[in-house]
Image (cartoon, rainbow, N blue to C red):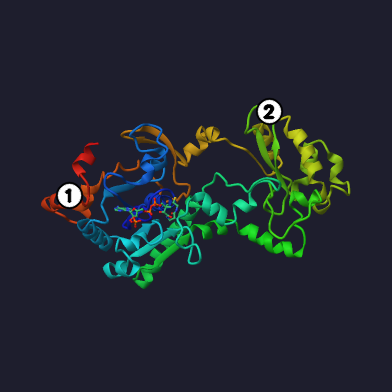
Amino acid sequence: MGKALEGVRILDFTHVQSGPTCTQLLAWFGADVIKVERPGVGDITRGQLQDIPNVDSLYFTMLNHNKRSITIDSKNPQGKAVLERLIRECDVLVENFAPGALDRMGFTWERVQELNPRMIMASIKGFGPGPYEDCKVYENVAQCTGGAASTTGFRDGLPLVTGAQIGDSGTGLHLALGIVTALYHRTQSGRGQRVTCAMQDGVLNLCRVKLRDQQRLAHGPLTEYSQYGEGVPFGDAVPRAGNDSGGGQPGRILKCKGWETDPNAYIYFITQAPVWGAICDVIGKPEWKTHPDYAKPAARLPRLNEIFGAIEDWTMTKTKFEAMEILNEYDIPCGPILSMKELAEDQSLRATGTLVEVEHPTRGTYLTVGNPIKLSDSPADVLRSPLLGEHTEEILRDVLGYADHDIAEIESSGAIGDIRRQAAE
Ligand code: COA
């Protein structure tokens, strides 16, 4: 049986992180992703944060698996002609250029539709239509303008950005869903359509619960926030909630054995109401099960500092893994704070293919995150990222049907760079 998206051909004009996340997922699902890169230069991330000189960076290799690379100068007339033929041959065009860049290349939505009415054209921009639509945007800008930063961190500290790339990778995920939805629609309509995703919108979507809290504020304090129990009044906007749980069940990050020297010796602990009795027994406070100040969730809210303090007295006697094991026996929701080192060494993540070792011709073996979305009939094989222009000749010949002399002529025009030199490098 073929892969889920086998037969779907994608013209991938993406670069940096947001767009490549999207097309990498589609490639893992079986689409033929043809990544267009500028001759001699390529995706800027090939050379960013390089750990080994003159070798494609991990930044690039970890975002561009299972793709083919063709180098085309989109501003060269011959290059444009090649791109027009690719547009006719592909099902989806994905791009995350700065606003207006694709239009300046001559590929407006109108022109793309003329060339291929079945084309789905998908774009990521920083902002949707409005005052900021022309701005270039990177990850942290999106986190700040989408509501994440104002609601992350501690009340008495700066707004904080998070390590999870919710602006870039998050928006790439949103776009991938838009693309497969448009592909499904096309099976009935016969036509392509425009799919757009703004990073601000993607982040705001992931901050949905904070917009929920913004509206709840009009009806009184947010009682599950620690500041309620501490008697600190709320302002007119959702405050930063530290490590408070975003749901209705209070939660905190608590110290575990070794916290004095290990920056990750902590556990997230949720005082879920149905297991309150078990929590009291585990931490040695059985009297709290019936005491009117502690027995019911509402009574506990003003006392969360004291309660979590008592729980922490217990977690500090256990390593995070010991605590996890004991708490799981009682279905008490918790999670150790895992470092990237611990995750990289996690055997169960390797067994499921979420972590994969990949062989690369110039880098050697490296570890990457595989497809986190598992399809039972279409498992993803993680194949290394392409070298710059590695498949230029192959695509010109096999996808577009150019003969050898055509390819030589295109090459001499400068439209595809020096493919023989690129192949040798
Ligand atoms: N051949 C010739 N020119 C090419 C080319 C090719 N194959 N590929 C790109 N270019 C040109 C573009 O046409 C553009 O030229 P122009 O400004 O003359 O029109 C130029 O390269 C630069 O492209 P741009 O997208 O503006 O790159 P940048 O490095 O200046 O900006 C971003 C990078 C990410 C800020 C910007 O692309 C952006 O805002 N993207 C949308 C939001 C986004 O995805 N951000 C997160 C990225 S992780």
Q: Position of residue 387 (x, y in %)?
A: 30, 41
Q: Position of residue 362 (x, y in %)?
A: 32, 33
Q: Amino acid at mark 2?
A: Glu
Q: Residues within 10 Å of mark 2 (few under 14, many from 20)?
A: few
Q: Which residue is the site of mark 1?
A: 411
Q: Which residue is the site of mark 2?
A: 260
Of residues 413 and 300, which is closer to you in this image?
413
Q: Position of residue 211 (x, y in %)?
A: 64, 61
Q: How many marks?
A: 2
Of residues 130 and 258, which is closer to you in this image?
130
- Whether residue 382 is visible, yes or no, is no
Q: Residue at x 68, y 28 (%)?
A: 260
Q: Residue at x 49, y 57 (%)?
A: 199
Furthest-left residue in view? 405
Task: Judge from the rendering whether residue 339 lies leftward or rightward of residue 310; answer left or right.
Answer: left
Q: Position of residue 349 (x, y in %)?
A: 50, 39
Q: Amino acid at mark 1?
A: Glu
Picture layout, residue 311 above or below residue 247: above
Q: Can you tell which mark lies on residue 225?
A: none
Q: Residues within 10 Å of mark 1 (few under 14, many from 20)?
A: some
Q: Residue at x 33, y 56 (%)?
A: 10
Which element carries disc 2, helix, strand or loop? loop
Lower sequence index among marks 1 and 2? 2
Give the foreground label among 1 and 2.
Answer: 1
User: Residue 421, located in which quarter of the rendered image?
Assistant: top left
Q: Residue at x 69, y 29 (%)?
A: 257
Which element carries disc 1, helix, strand or loop? helix
